[in-house]
Image (cartoon, rainbow, N blue to C red):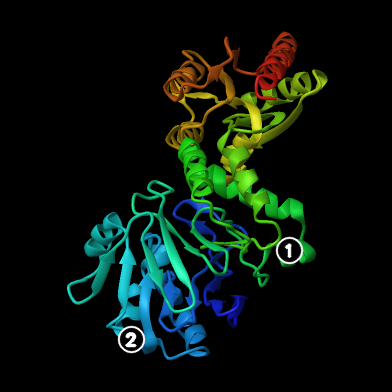
Amino acid sequence: MKTTEIKPGIFWVGAIDWAVRDFHGYVTPKGTTYNNYLIMDDRVTLVDTVKHDFTHVTLENIKTLTDPSKITDLVINHIEPDHASGIDKIMSLAPDALIHITGKGKKGLDRHFDTSQWKFRIVKTGDTLNTGKFNLLFIETPMLHWPDSMMTYVKEAKLLISQDAFGQHIATSSRFDDEFVECASQAELEDSVVDYYANILMPFGELIKAKITEIQKLGIDIDMIAPDHGVIWRKGPGGIIRKYLDLANGKSSLSVAVIYDTMWHSTELMTIPIMQGIKDEGVDCNVIKLRATPMSAAIKEFWKSRGCLIGSPTLNNILFPTVAEFLTHLRGLRPKNRMIGAFGSYGWGGGAVREAYEEFKRMKLEIFEPGSQVLYKPSHEDNIACYDFGRNFARKIKEYHAKFM
């Protein structure tokens, strides 16, 4: 891809990764982009680098605008390798560039590179950089989503370079949100936002709300948001900010995600009357089999729904491995404002449903009890009980969901 001028004098010089499908365990069926930005001014300033595999791409893009040796300043908003692992190649071409980075970011870079010959300026919220006609304002955003994270606001361009916040994992030739919607759809873009938030930023809802409030108190005027992944928000960036506030507040649809796995189909058979009971109570339902679904897709469906039922057969007196993995992954994301229950089948001793409820308590979610269990294969009576279980859960979900309206 060639460079794109996103604001007068400010260029996207990043790379598109059409092929990546595993992003540190997060499945990316649409690939991703590594966005970074070159400010052509009296002081030529590069904001972020890219993943090391694509450093040659960003360098070729930069060369269409200037000799990389002319870079005087390098802003590192985030040291995660998909944004900073190309820094050594950049610095080899611009050895006199001054690196602007948070204190924790500097400590992190020191663990990955020999930084002894590099020049650093440690910055914090409120610090600025004048490049000539532009003034850059640095805003620390610790734990969004790493300790070193920050954003960079270009005052004269009304541009917020937002690091990982407001991103999406989409490989696309469209650089802007309105371009993407024109060739794809608004629904696809919004789904990618939710997918990204659920799998990466879910634990940080309270921090997100606090940081948005802090940015608003700074009184900065934003008419474009440029994240480090996906499309750039130029058509009403206030919309994506409101979307993030909704996500941070745990907004969801009135629906239930039934997430399960099965060994000899008994647990799978239980999902049919459970789903029907939920639907007959007027609540939408989505059924997800874990071994047939990427973990990140199951996490997204969990987050989109107000309620979730977890189904697991008992194997060796505990949860089926894929279900245990899902719940461990979910616990690390620290979900809130969701109701959850469990069901499953067993052959002799049982144990999976009990262990699921122990996990729910660790997560401090709203718990629906008791769970539903069947011995071996569901009988006619078991199917009726499963139907009632689903319907009763849907009734409770409607009551619980009303608290958030």
Give coordinates of residue 254: x percent, y percent. 72, 28
Q: Is residue 274 above or below residue 320?
A: above
Label 1 sits on what residue type? Asp
Most foreground residue, 371 or 45? 45
Q: What number is the disc on residue 93? A: 2
Residue at 51% from the left image edge and 88% from the top image edge: 65
Disc marking residue 87: none
Whole-angstrom CA distance, mark 2 to mark 1, is 35 Å
**Residue 228 image point, x, y percent:** 51, 63
Closer to the chain start, of discs 2 and 1, is 2
Q: Is 105 placed left or right of 39 in the picture? A: left
Q: Which residue is mark 1?
A: 178
Look at label 2 and name its amino acid.
Leu
Q: Is residue 253 left or right of residue 296?
A: right
Indicate the secondary structure of the residue bearing disc 1.
helix
Q: Position of residue 147 (x, y in %)?
A: 34, 49
